[in-house]
Amino acid sequence: MSRAKPIVLLSLAVLAAGCATRRGSAVATSPGGRATAGAETAGPTTQVEQPERPLDTGPDVQPLREDQAAGQEILGDDGGGPLADVRFSYNLATLSEEARATLSRHAQWLQQHPETRVTIEGHCDERGTVEYNLALGDLRAQAAREFLVSLGIAADRLSPISFGKERPLDSSTTDAAFARNRRAHFVVSR
């Protein structure tokens, strides 16, 4: 019986090592299990590892096909949408004074164009897990939406969605690129 114990322990160790998964950095969550965007957590400073299998984006997050995008956005003269992106600080969904000023201008434009609807896309930089960034992107989109609603824009005209880190504006791994990717993007449609 004394020989069986080391074999069992060795087998358990091998099994545990085989089942172990690599984890990213720790993520602060609320008691409900939702990621909190207000807490600063140390994220990886280098490129995040790509999963071995493709991500299952689920029914709510699907890639936009070329034929879906055609003709749906109202484009300004410069080829961009009429509503500028709002930027966020690392790991936060709090609106800065600059973001509030931008959203105030957006509210004025939306009041002048009552026939329009807006999808507010929450985006993150590539640091952190997919799940955490989807939650943070959602908080960013919701923060922009709530501010616009507080300025008198009807809530049913504003549809928040999170893309997390899945649709970077800039795919390089510099701090400047990370800052450009932390945003709420506004897609205007009729």
Image (spheres, rainbow, N blue to C red):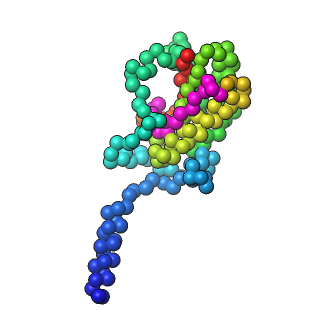
Left or right: where does residue 26 sit relative to residue 112? left
Question: Residues in magenta?
Answer: 155-170
> Residue 112: x, y in percent?
67, 14
Residue lying at the far right in this picture: please name it. 151
Left or right: where does residue 149 sit relative to residue 135? right
Q: Is residue 179 visible?
A: no
Q: Quadrant of residue 155?
A: top right
Kindly identify the residue that appears in the image at 55 percent across and 16 percent down.
190
Task: In the rendered view, tell whether residue 98 sits above or below residue 81.
Answer: below
Q: Quadrant of residue 14?
A: bottom left
Q: Is residue 165 visible?
A: yes
> Residue 186: x, y in percent?
56, 25
> Residue 125: x, y in percent?
49, 39
Kindly identify the residue that appears in the image at 39 percent across and 56 percent down.
22
Q: Quadrant of residue 1?
A: bottom left
Task: In the rendered view, tell whether residue 115 sits above or below residue 33.
Answer: above
Kindly identify the residue that appears in the image at 54 percent across and 38 percent down.
137
Kindly identify the residue that appears in the image at 69 percent across and 29 percent down.
149
Q: Is residue 62 magenta?
A: no
Q: Nearer the viewer, residue 115 or 139?
A: 115
